[in-house]
Amino acid sequence: MSDSALSKFYTYGTNAERLAFVPDPPPGVNVLYIWYETDTTDIYIYDGSSWILAINASPAGDVTGGTTSVDRSIAVYDGTTGKVLTTSAPVITTTGRITTVTNPTGAQDAATKSYVDAAVSGSTGTLSTLSFITVVTETINAPNSRLLAAGTGLDLDTTAAGIISVVLETNQRMRSFGITVDGGGSVFTTGTKGYIRVPYSGTISKWTLMADTIGNVTVNIYKDTIGNYPPVVSDTITATTPPSLTATYVRETTSLPSWVTTVTAGDIFAFNVDTVTTMTRVTLVVDVTLS
């Protein structure tokens, strides 16, 4: 059927008039009614039994676009009405990267690559203090790393690649050395029972003696350099209060009156049993706080 064979009736009026309108002639296969609604500016078509909305002049929603746009920029609502979309500075590239982002200023801001690179390289100064970091304690060889300098927080220094100075809590700075003297089921004898080389520097802070049975024992400690090996009684570090047990089998103390408590990496320590009764095995542990 050609378009000329179709009878088209164009009419107009208000919404109320359209609803009250009775098509005449009645719509059929060759009759089409089109209504322009003057109070809404909507356009309707009559399908033979009811009006069908063809063009909605006032669609639901009130969000509109801006007058200009930037290719691939992120659309955001403006801060005035919240109903107008506008472009923002960040742009999503065809490869999925987000670009033209500024450096963060607030604690919850996202960080840019340049900001992180600058913080790691040290160009922005000192990283924020970490709760578990207090003082520098020891140095660890770490190829291709940077120096973390002393102080609170981590100061990055690019001039000393290859060394990391680790900053630890007090309990993480504790080391210990010692000896176990075992008589093989019999009361062990007096005399020097062994030597140990200590590879770290620090300060002796406590000693602990633990025996297999109640008794008495005194264990003296000598110290000297490897060039003066072996340490002898004149090299004692315990003054008049060497580690001892009297009628007991365990004791520890941080009281070290007149002791030479300084430990230098490479020092040689000797352990000498001055006196012993009853005991067949005893262990001496010396605690050191790292420098």
Image: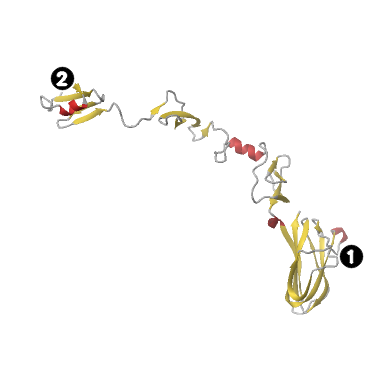
Residue 87, x across and y down, in percent: 46, 28
The reply to whether residue 139 is visible in this rendering is no
The residue lying furthest to the left in this view is 25
Alpha carbon of mark 2 to alpha carbon of mark 1: how far? 128 Å
Residue 72, x across and y down, in percent: 46, 30
- Taking the spot 25% from the left edge, 24% from the top edge, the residue there is 39
Which of the 4 quarters of the picture holds residue 192? Answer: bottom right
The kind of residue on which mark 2 rests is Ser
Q: Which residue is mark 2?
A: 4
The kind of residue on which mark 1 rests is Ser
Closer to the camera, 260 or 164?
A: 260
Q: Secondary structure at mark 2?
A: helix
Compared with residue 178, is residue 166 higher up or lower down, i.e. above or below? above
Q: Depth-wise, is mark 2 or mark 1 nearer the camera?
A: 1
Image quadrant containing the N terminus = top left
Q: In the shown orientation, is residue 57 left or right of residue 128? A: left
Q: Identify the disc placed on residue 234.
A: 1
Residue 285, x across and y down, in percent: 75, 66
